[in-house]
């Protein structure tokens, strides 16, 4: 609640001084011998206008602050998204096991999904999902890798030589 | 040459996503249509097998920043692949013809 008091000016007008403010609001146009309630009504109107102006300014200020905070939050999210990267160790496992021809495309696909997940669930969850994706890929990739390096041929040859058939 | 079920579904996904059939689009299409997650490696291993058989061919796309500068690999089905898929699906249809499944709507 704004506190105010009135003061009689030299020219016969009435001034209102609002507490905490140096501003002096001058009310003119009151009859020479205005009744006390007329003066009081005029004062209340001035104070109400002042309060409204003050409220608008406060409201405007709050809006600016809200805007700035929202902008900051968006910037922080974008920065976090840009700096988010898939787990290095998981990438290494995939690059080691994936066929040379498709390894880069495969890692690129995993990274694309990772960034989509960062947008949807946040970085921590996205990293967890990346690890799950890699864990479920190890079996098929390992199988392909063993076939590629001829592991099974070597194994069969070994048992053939050992068992003599 | 017979196709495995995984090969069938991956080839059908390629047909659905052409000309934008690459790892992520195939992964999302399979997840949406089959209502389950297929590991990305399973898709790639299947694609590698299909390419070896001459049913699918791949070409390198452009590298993008969101993929860490790695290029996409686009896939398309060859004529031989289409014939094999057609034969495989027809065989399945013949097998299915006349059978009655409880709760089936088609």
Image: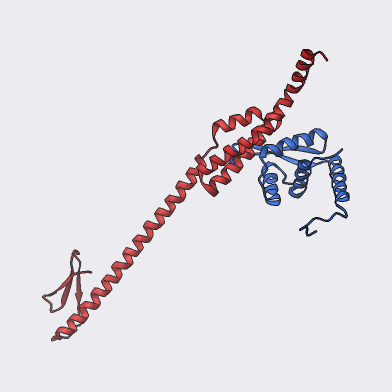
User: Could you say where residue A40 lies in the image, as x and y percent from the top left?
Assistant: 18, 80
Q: Is residue B64 visible?
A: no
Q: Going by the image, does B82 lie left or right of A132?
A: right
Q: Quadrant of residue A148?
A: top right
User: Could you say where residue B4 lies in the image, as x and y percent from the top left?
Assistant: 80, 40
Judge by depth and name the residue closer to the eye, B94 or A89.
B94
User: Could you say where residue A32 lies in the image, as x and y percent from the top left?
Assistant: 14, 85
Q: Residue at x 74, y 19 (%)?
A: A155
The C terminus of chain B, quarter of image: bottom right
Q: Quadrant of residue A97?
A: top right
Judge by depth and name the residue closer to the eye, A111 or A31.
A111
Which chain does the red colour mark?
A
The N terminus of chain B, quarter of image: top right
Q: Going by the image, does B105 lie left or right of A105?
A: right
- Colour mapping used in the image: by chain
Judge by depth and name the residue closer to the eye, A152 or A129.
A152
Q: Quadrant of residue A87?
A: top right
Q: Looking at the image, is B98 positioned above or below residue A157?
A: below
Which chain does the blue colour mark?
B
Q: Going by the image, does B75 lie left or right of B96?
A: left
User: Could you say where residue B22 lies in the image, as x and y percent from the top left?
Assistant: 70, 42
Q: Residue at x 55, y 32 (%)?
A: A88
Q: How many marks?
A: 0
Q: Residue at x 75, y 16 (%)?
A: A158
Q: Going by the image, does B10 lie left or right of A52?
A: right
Q: Is residue B53 visible?
A: yes
């Amino acid at each position: 609640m704004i506190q105010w008091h009135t003061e009689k000016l030299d020219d016969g007008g009435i001034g209102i001084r609002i507490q905490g403010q140096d501003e002096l609001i001058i009310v003119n146009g009151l009859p020479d011998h205005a009744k006390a309630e007329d003066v009081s009504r005029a004062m209340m109107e001035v104070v109400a206008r002042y309060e409204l102006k003050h409220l608008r300014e406060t409201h405007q200020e709050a809006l600016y602050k809200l805007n700035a905070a929202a902008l900051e939050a968006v910037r922080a999210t974008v920065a976090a998204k840009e700096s988010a990267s898939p787990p290095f160790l998981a990438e290494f496992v995939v690059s080691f096991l994936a066929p040379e021809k498709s390894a880069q495309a495969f890692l690129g696909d995993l990274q694309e999904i990772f960034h989509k997940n960062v947008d949807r669930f946040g970085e921590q969850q996205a990293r967890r999902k990346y690890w799950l994706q890699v864990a479920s890929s190890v079996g098929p990739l390992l199988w392909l890798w063993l076939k590629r390096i001829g592991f099974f041929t070597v194994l069969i040859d070994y048992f053939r030589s050992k068992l003599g058939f | 040459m017979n196709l495995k079920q995984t090969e069938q579904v991956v080839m059908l996904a390629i047909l659905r996503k052409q000309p934008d059939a690459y790892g992520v689009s195939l992964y999302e299409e399979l997840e949406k249509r089959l209502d389950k997650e297929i590991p990305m490696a399973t898709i790639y291993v299947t694609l590698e097998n299909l390419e070896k058989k001459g049913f699918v061919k791949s070409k390198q796309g452009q590298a993008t920043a969101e993929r860490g500068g790695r290029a996409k690999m686009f896939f398309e089905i060859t004529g031989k692949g289409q014939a094999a898929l057609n034969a495989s699906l027809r065989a399945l249809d013949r097998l299915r013809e006349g059978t009655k499944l409880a709760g089936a709507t088609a």
